[in-house]
Image (cartoon, rainbow, N blue to C red):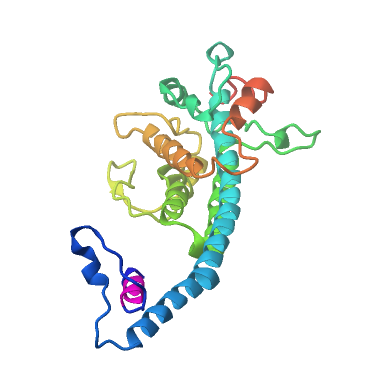
Amino acid sequence: MIISIYGLVRYSNLTVIDLPFNIESIFIKPTNSDGIFIDLSIGYIVSAIFYLMIVFYPEKVRKNKVTKVALAEFSTVCTDAMILIILIYKNVSLKSEWNYKHLTDDKVFFDKNFYNRMQRFDVYKTADTLLCQKEEPFDIITWDEKLQNDLDDFVKRIDVTLNRYLYFLDDEIIDSALAFQKNNFITAYLGLPTNDLGMSYSGVNGKKYSDRIPLHLFINNVGDRKMVPIFGANDLCDNSKILNSYVDTLLELRNHCYNITGFHKDIAFKLFCEDICGEYGIAI
């Protein structure tokens, strides 16, 4: 474009004015030049303007609109994922420990106390959900079942959104969505494919096994024995790391949704602190 504008000016019949450092010499039209250079320059400039008006600008507008729609869908996943983990947090906290006041951003929940208290989480306890509060007869839903359903739902919703809008999304948004979809907690709990070399299990014989087996299957097939809290730590492993992966990737994806209409950074605070949703200490 710059070369075309330069050629258009130099090979035109415009009068060249005096410029500092004798720069005007590069704009003087050669005596033996013909009109082909002007024609080429005009043709390129017109083509560039045509491209900007007909292709680039409409494509940019379309991309912005589609990105906004995709982020709106991702924001609902972030909201539900945030509500899920903070509901568990309230279920493992005592009333005397729940001292959060006037938060403007739910990420403040994820402090040192959060990770310490979450190690109490008993996945065999009845889930804190309306489905367990219906009139009899009703089915008891454990936290294991709720986690399976909710985590699987997050994975499918992200898949649907990416399949629809992948072409229009920036790499940063795609990477953040995939990072949350494949975070260590969801991957381990649902048994999703992974490239993580650390995904292995120890058997009763002390041997290591690399089978990609969903964690919830171990929870459901231990007989009378209960697994240690899924976010707990022992001599063999520190499962708080998978919780950390869930939180970090959730917050990263959530950062892209800040400007979406209807997205609230303090949704969990409003539900569990202001509206008093969730029970204290029932999942310990």
Residue 5 belongs to magenta span:
yes
Residue 181 can be seen, yes or no: yes
In terms of image quadrants, where is residue 137? top right
- The region drawn magenta spans 4-10
Q: Would residue 54 be found to the left or right of residue 42 on screen? A: right
Q: Nearer the viewer, residue 5 or 142?
A: 5
**Which quarter shows the N terminus?**
bottom left
Residue 238 belongs to magenta span:
no
Q: Nearer the viewer, residue 34 or 89?
A: 34
In terms of image quadrants, where is residue 67? bottom right
Most prominent secondary structure in the magenta stretch? helix
Q: Residue at x 60, y 35 (%)?
A: 264
Q: Position of residue 232 (x, y in %)?
A: 40, 29
Compared with 108, 59 (above or below) is below
Q: Please identify the residue farthest to the top as the structure is shown.
A: 96
In terms of image quadrants, where is residue 75? top right
